[in-house]
Amino acid sequence: EVQLVESGGGLVQPGGSLRLSCAASGFTFSDHYMDWVRQAPGKGLEWVGRSRNKAKSYTTEYAASVKGRFTISRDDSKNSLYLQMNSLRTEDTAMYYCARITRIEGVYNYFDYWGQGTLVAVSS
Amino acid sequence: DIYMTQSPSSLSASVGDRVTITCRASQNIGSHLNWYQQKPGRAPKLLIYTASNFYSGVPSRFSGSGSGTEFTLTITSLQPEDFATYYCQQSSTAVWAFGQGTKVEIK
């Protein structure tokens, strides 16, 4: 059974840092691209960023709203995905989900599994 | 960046109704369009991928169509468990984007 379990959320002051983790199980983690998606309270889904797999040199992508402040990394030996968040702002307050990407023929992509999310609150 | 616009933002419908949600992309995205359902307090779930393909276990009352810049999600006979928020999402470019969501409420 595929499972994604996020952790590391909490309350942090503006300007502070936080590191989220996503522990994966039930599939070959190293094969998959993995993303972070967030959802502010009462708002819609916002794509945050991506970690590609080893075959794609672990390259990353970021939304403009977090570029330069957030860093995505992974440790395939631990089946884990990470989101290092620096210079946090009140508008970063959200539930943060990790999500697995499945790719069809290397062209079509979708999120087929999501974690339950971890809540980040940025407030003084 | 590609922007996704859904309409309507919300709708009220009754059990048994046919419901259609539209999603428009700011640029041509071919068939790189997915649909998700989210219920309060839960993570989203995949319904439709590549515009019109059913994900495993999704009831056949859900269907997707469209290509290029205009897409639709149709629920042919709304069931009580379908009251939720629905999101489209483009995967055409390296930077992905979601629509703002359509909340389907009970009339």
Image (tube, coloured by chain):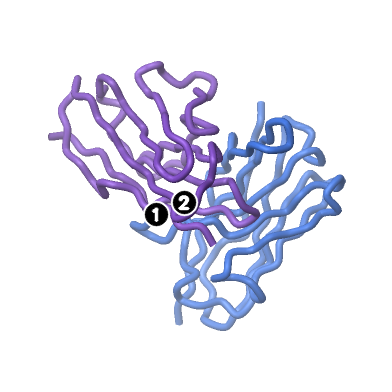
Dot in front, 1 or 2: 2
Question: Which type of secondary structure does the marked residue at label 2 adopt?
Answer: strand
Q: Image check: A66 left or right of B45?
A: right
Q: Quadrant of the N terminus of chain B?
A: bottom right
Q: Which residue is mark 1?
A: A44
Colour assigned to chain B in the rendering is: purple
Work out whether residue A118 can be spotted: no
Question: Which type of secondary structure does the marked residue at label 1 adopt?
Answer: loop
Colour assigned to chain A in the rendering is: blue
Residue at 71% across, 57% down: A82
Q: Which residue is mark 2?
A: B98
Please give the chain letter of the residue carrying mark 1.
Answer: A
Residue A124 placement (x, y as % from top left): 45, 82
> A113 or B96, which lies in front?
B96
Q: Do the residues marked 1 and 2 share a common chain?
A: no
Residue B76 placement (x, y as % from top left): 28, 21
Residue B81 placement (x, y as % from top left): 31, 26
Q: Quadrant of the C terminus of chain B?
A: top left
Q: Amino acid at mark 1?
A: Gly
Residue at 47% across, 37% down: B67
Query: Dot 2, how many residues are within 10 Å of its Cα: few (below 14), some (14-19), or many (20+)?
Result: many
> A41 or A65, which lies in front?
A65
Work out whether residue B10 can be spotted: yes
Looking at this rendering, what residue extends furthest in the top direction? Answer: B60
Residue at 57% across, 41% down: A114
